[in-house]
Amino acid sequence: MRILLISTSYPRDKSDWRGVFMRHLVFSLARIPDLKLRVWAPPGDLPEQATMAASPTDRQWLKRLMAAGGISHLMRSGGWRSWGAPIRLLRMIGASYRENADVDLYHINWLQCALPLPANGKPALISVLGNDMLLLKLPLVRHLLRRVMKQRKVVICPNAEWMQAPLHAAFGDLAAIQPVSFGIDPSWFAVERSPHDVCPPYRWIVVSRLTADKLGSLFSWSKNFFGDGSRELHLFGPMQEDIQVPSWIHYHGSATPEQLAKEWFAHACGLITLSRHAEGRPQVMLEAMAAGLPIIASNLQAHASILVDGETGKLCGSVEEFGAALRTLEDDQANQRLGNAAKRWVVREIGTWDDCAERYMQIYRLLLGVT
């Protein structure tokens, strides 16, 4: 089975936080026997069983794109490159489709990467993240996607169930809509937390790209509860907008998954995410849950699809609810109860990246009529 996997993000090495989930997916797919994987993506470490499909020129351009924050960030930041970059990107992806005409199936990450699909009838699996839902609001995009889908068998795979209904409304007459959850690296399941970590000063962590939408109400709500020495708020993530971080927040910049797992998740009271950003199924939340780390989250649909309020985490829609959630999870017994319940849910519902790869493999077989 020959698969061409298309992705506009990929980490350059093990220390790179950007697109880490794509590296996990590629390595897991490559471990499946009888699957020949070609990867069109920015340059980075590939498993021996996979081959790089991007040309040297493409790789250099994609490398610069990653350094600029990726195509979504470039579009949000505006400027002349926000229009020129997507056009060039689609041209390169279209050329890759044509140059790999002998593959059996396309595995396409993100809806926009399906726009230049050739009229050759080859089936496609299209994975969808939360940002893709914003893409559908742009003029003509839905029409153009429907045109390429009419020519082939398609399964659209959002990484969260909440996207299933709007995707079915847009494409359900042309494609099957099958949610597929991403996996979790085993290192997160191996994190061991101690009840002694839930003690003053309570150490809370936030892992997020620093944009206004991703941070949401974090600064305005937290200022009422942090800064007096009883609690610490530690923020990790790349600065992608001009954000002024308050002095009472410990800002550490970007951190690798290994640093977070070994140095922070094991000894934190919990994870906070007050994002108002369009989310699919936030990977950092799943990783925290796999580590048994309780979560306080804004009451977004994406967050509510993961957390059951009061059972596997705390959802909040106001500063008062946020403060109550902090106090609840600073009780050792409540902290352990919700953290353990979250871990059990992730083990049961999500599993590892090998589990994720097998979910995709089942869809490959369906699209190709292979039993």
Image (spheres, helix red, strand yellow):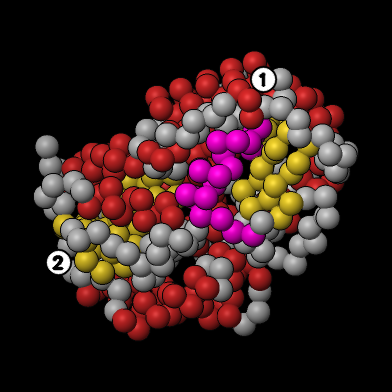
Nearer-the-camera pick, 110 or 326: 326
Q: Magenta stretch?
A: 253-271
Residue 108 image position (x, y, % from top left): 35, 57
Residue shown at 48% from the left, 26% from the top? 343
Spatial CA span between label 1 and label 2: 58 Å
- The answer to whether residue 173 of the structure is visible from this angle is no
Residue shown at 41% from the left, 27% from the top? 347
Nearer-the-camera pick, 119 or 91: 91
Q: Which residue is mark 1?
A: 332
Compared across the picture, whether 79 is left or right of 283 comes to right
Vertical comparison of 343 with 268: above or below? above
Residue 70 image position (x, y, % from top left): 52, 68
Determine whether label 1 and label 2 are within 8 Å by CB.
no
Residue shown at 63% from the left, 25% from the top? 196
Count neighbours of disc 1 (C-alpha within 10 A) and say few if under 14, some if 14 to 19, many if 20 or more: some
Q: Amino acid at mark 2?
A: Asp
Quadrant position of the C terminus in the picture: top left
- Quadrant of the rendered image containing residue 320: top right
Compared across the picture, whether 161 is left or right of 369 comes to right
SS under mark 1: helix
